[in-house]
Image (cartoon, helix red, strand yellow):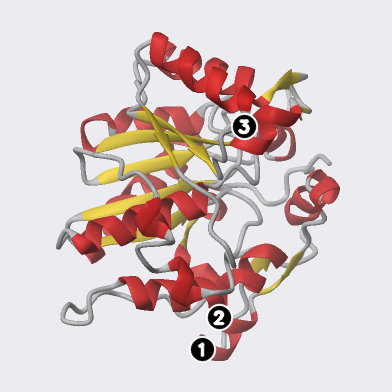
Amino acid sequence: MSKTGFDNEKYLKEQTQAIVDRVKKFGNKLYLEFGGKLCFDYHAARVLPGYDPNVKIRLLQSLKDKLDIVLCIYAGDIEKGRVRGDFGITYDAATLKLIDDLRKWGLDILAVVITRFANQSSAVIFKNKLERRGVKVYLHYPIDGYPADVDAIVSEKGFGRNEFIETKNPICVVTAPGPNSGKLSTCLSQLYHEHKRGVNAGYAKFETFPIWNLPLKHPLNLAYEAATADIQDFNLVDPFHLNKYNKTSINYNRDVESFPILKLILSRIFDKNVTLPMYNSPTDMGVNRAGFGIVDDKTEWKN
């Protein structure tokens, strides 16, 4: 019998509470970007002995009455027929599969957002297919200068052009069938519209890897790095966290590189008359209690 190094119940309790606490920090609404696979996370199960590949679905079930789920898909991926490596299906097919998988778990989606939509013919066909199935579809458009031109982004010609997604619950989970689908931009666009409406919404990022409170060269973090080599991700010490708190935490290059711009965009979006928490580092931004679910760090970790 193989050893178990991860306690799913402990993790569920820790991660659920961390999400609830983050909602309370902002008060009204939290847009929670979900990184990684929502269902069937066999990578995590492979490197974390005992990890339930559907533990994130179980977490969403426990918060079912408090959340909406929005899926993002990049119009360019639909047009190019981009294929998801693990299942060998295109991203539009993966989106339909994810909708069906969630429904099997008793979770329904609120809407699908087609991001960077520029009237691509395949994206229009996919939009019509979703709407025939009773799925609400919203369109978000390319923004010139994204993400560097903050003045253009945080304006009526930037986020203001995007269709606003009407949500009902305090937590809005924003996820996707794969990376680079526009999750972050969707969250920020929603924040822009919410604050224009007087709603003090906030943003956070649900993460599993890298595990911030394990060493940089821990086998688990190395396994994450190996799994994302195709998109040139790599782990590093979060320099903003180290500078602010004099504490070492592990993050990855894209979050560290984009953090200054993200912080600037958030500062432009947030109502100047309302005091809202502002993140000091990418680690602050994340909600990640995976490291606290590890109960036996001497287990022989797999790669």
Q: Which residue is mark 3?
A: 120
Q: Disc 1 residue type?
A: Lys
Pick whichever, 193 or 302, lies toward us. 193
At 46% from the left and 79% from the top, the residue drawn is 264
The relative height of residue 27 versus residue 109 in the rendered view (above or below) is below
Q: Position of residue 248 (x, y in %)?
A: 62, 78
Q: Is residue 34 left or right of residue 224?
A: left
Cα separation, mark 1 vs mark 3, equals 44 Å
- According to the image, label 2 marks what residue? 241
- Residue 23 in view here: no
Q: CA distance from mark 2 to mark 1?
A: 5 Å
Q: Is residue 106 left or right of residue 153?
A: left
Q: Which residue is mark 1?
A: 244
Towards the viewer: 62 or 164: 164
Label 3 residue SS: loop
Task: Look at the picture and state if 18 lies above or below 148.
Answer: above
